[in-house]
């Protein structure tokens, strides 16, 4: 049976960023808001298989570097790298972010292991996650593995840097 992957984009209330409207005719044009539909993250089948294998039986949090390319608002993950971990519990991991140094680094993916928490909490970044993500200038995405139905399915939610309002960005820096 082929592996299936469910990818959702995470919408935190009020996550909108604005891009300037064209000013070519010198007419005032309103700014066009970016929305979740403007962004996409894609994983190769090999990466999906690795993620299912790694997260399918995890009882502790595991951060992984997502590697690939970004084309506009599309992120293509074609490789992953596990950074050195110093401590790991079911809710927190301290790891060496320098192990993610690569020209193809897109951001981190990790799991939240407490399956008894409601999905909207389990699949959302924690305060610690947001602080780390927003202070990692190289990261364009932060992904969270919500559920794994080993060995066939995985559900991932992703936060895109451009959709986080400046007020929230300032709060976590």
Image (cartoon, rainbow, N blue to C red):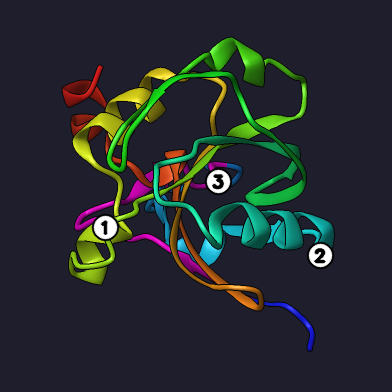
166 left or right of 138? left
> In this orientation, does residue 160 appear?
yes
27 left or right of 79? left
| Secondary structure category for the residue under label 3 | loop
> In this orientation, does residue 19 appear?
no
To which residue does mark 3 refer?
A: 22
Dot 1 crowding, Cα within 10 Å, few <14, some 14–19, many 20+: some
- Real-space Cα separation, disc 1 to disc 2, in angstroms: 26 Å
Is residue 139 found inside the magenta-colored segment of the image? no
The C terminus - image quarter = top left
Residue 157: where, in percent of width, then height? 45, 60
Q: Earlier in the sequence, mark 1 or mark 2?
A: 2
To which residue does mark 2 refer?
A: 45
Residue 87: where, in percent of width, then height? 39, 21
- Residue sitting at 77 percent across and 20 percent down? 103
Name the one closer to the observer, 43 or 91: 91
Which range of residues does the magenta coloring cover? 5-23
Residue 166: where, in percent of width, then height? 26, 31
**Relative height, residue 61 to residue 10 (above, below):** above
To which residue does mark 1 refer?
A: 114
- Residue sitting at 40 percent across and 41 percent down? 61
């Amino acid at each position: 049976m082929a592996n299936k992957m469910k990818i959702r984009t995470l919408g935190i209330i009020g996550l909108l960023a604005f891009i300037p409207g064209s000013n070519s005719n010198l007419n005032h044009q309103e700014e066009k808001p970016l929305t979740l539909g403007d962004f996409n993250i894609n994983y190769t089948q090999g990466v999906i298989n690795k993620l299912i294998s790694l997260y399918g039986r995890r009882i502790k949090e595991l951060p992984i570097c997502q590697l690939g390319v970004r084309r506009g608002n599309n992120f293509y993950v074609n490789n992953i790298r596990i950074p050195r971990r110093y401590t790991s519990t079911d809710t927190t991991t301290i790891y060496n972010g320098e192990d993610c140094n690569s020209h193809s680094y897109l951001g981190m993916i990790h799991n939240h292991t407490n399956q008894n928490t409601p999905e909207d909490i389990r699949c959302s970044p924690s305060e610690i996650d947001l602080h780390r993500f927003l202070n990692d200038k190289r990261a364009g995405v932060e992904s969270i593995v919500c559920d794994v139905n080993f060995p066939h399915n995985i559900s991932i939610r992703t936060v895109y840097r451009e959709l986080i309002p400046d007020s929230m960005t300032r709060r976590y820096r």
